[in-house]
Image (cartoon, rainbow, N blue to C red):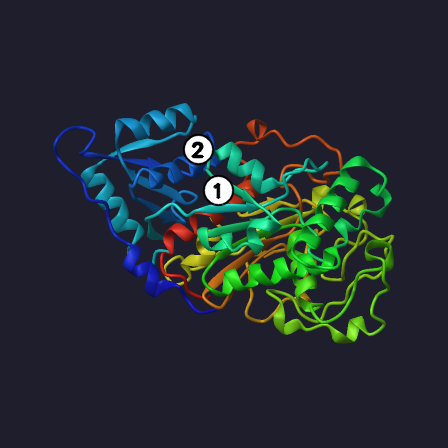
Amino acid sequence: MRSFASTCIALILGLSVGFSGPAQSQDVLVPMDDAQTNHLKAYGAAFWVLTQNQEADWLLNYRGGSFLMNASDALEEELRIRDVYYERLSASESAELVNRVESDGNNQAAVRLETAPEIAVYAPDQTVPWDDAVLLALTYAEVPYDMIYDREVLNGELGNYDWLHLHHEDFTGQLGKFLRFRNTAWYMEKQQEAEAVAAEFGFRKISELKLEVAQTIRSYVEQGGFLFSMCLGTETLDLALAAHDTDIVPEEYDGDPVDPNARERLDYSQTFAFRDFQPDLNPHSTDHSDIDTGLPPPSMRDPSLDYFTLFDFSAQWDPVPTMLTQNHVSTVPGFVGQTTAFNANMVKDHVVNLAEMPARNEIKYLHGGLGEGTFTFFAGHDPEDYQHFVGDPPTDLNLHPNSPGYRLILNNILFPAATPERQQT
């Protein structure tokens, strides 16, 4: 992996402090260790500071990845309203802290957060019987975002955004392979809407529409976009890209048969993270490919033994993976989904594994570069609902304000704020 050290060295500076009164002579430290009352809303507070044309320092590996910001009455009011724990520091204490974090031989770094990224979530308008963890996290943390879908992507609107999340989406055009739900109202609505948009843009079937969307997203990243995805969106994005010159969709979904040579015609050069995988061509199976290591069925996984451990990266030399793994714990409980974990043998060499899954040849969380942009894939559906079924109620994050799994999601929204020049890892 190519280091981001050169970029972040330019971003690593102390805070400027005025002396006109108490608020100007103090800074606010928002610790992100076990002292924090609400980790998730703390990210929202840091994002709010950026929207006020202020800057903040992200203290990597210091007390769980704490934030240091200029004190103001407005900021302290926001922190109190959000129930975010904070500490006041004098100018000298703040300068001493930054110097200590930046000292040689200390696996810590201060990275300047400069501009709030424009955030888009690729998600349908229609109601579907499942929830998206990123939408839940952004809403709970009070981070502003726009929702876009196929029309907006194909009409060129991705260029308006710095950061894009892919909702739980099937980019192969198989509608999640939920054939058993085909007579339900939500399934029929989803199919009819997708077919209408496909026809609107001149495509014969849904898979052709979704391929065009996937390729447009790929171009967005190549040109400098930041992409984040979870669960099925990770796996099916690469499936669709690899199958750009063949048909892997069974007749039950698109009215024509699978290409008999489909497996031989996959093009892994077009994918983000995965290689050497094979699609699951059984229309009655909800599995999409052998990228996912969710077998045996998730119900047969033991939640008490399902966890992953975040790697400890060098904050000063590898700040990007360090940013993405900031947490108050090193071991995070696992959770399943349609795509539960990635087969390590199918991950491309340039992709960085961000977390270890003991005793399994699996990767839960990964990051890589494509062109001038980056992508981060996080397997599983909901970090606080071990096995989320279709129709289950959404997770109430008021009950999980310190969720380490949701923290990993929110690390990703601040990553673009710390890297104004888009670079490849």
Please name whichever residue, 39 or 135, is drawn nearer the observer in this view of the structure. Answer: 135
First of labels 2, 1 by sequence position: 2
Q: Is residue 90 left or right of residue 211?
A: left
* Residue 55: percent from left, percent from top: 30, 44
For label 2, the crowd category at 10 Å Cα-Cα, with few meaning under 14, some 14 to 19 and many 20 or more, is many
Q: Is residue 300 left or right of residue 235?
A: right
Residue beneath disc 2: 36
Residue under the point 79% across and 71% down? 262
| Amino acid type assigned to the residue bearing label 1 in the image | His
Find numbered disc 2 in the image and state the secondary structure of the residue it sits on.
Answer: loop
| Amino acid type assigned to the residue bearing label 2 in the image | Gln
Q: CA distance from mark 2 to mark 1?
A: 9 Å
Q: Is residue 400 left or right of residue 31?
A: right
Q: Are marks 2 and 1 in contact (CB under 8 Å)?
A: yes
* Residue 374: percent from left, percent from top: 49, 61
Residue beneath disc 1: 328
Find numbered disc 1 in the image and state the secondary structure of the residue it sits on.
Answer: loop
Looking at the image, residue 226 lies above or below residue 80: below
* Residue 219: percent from left, percent from top: 53, 64
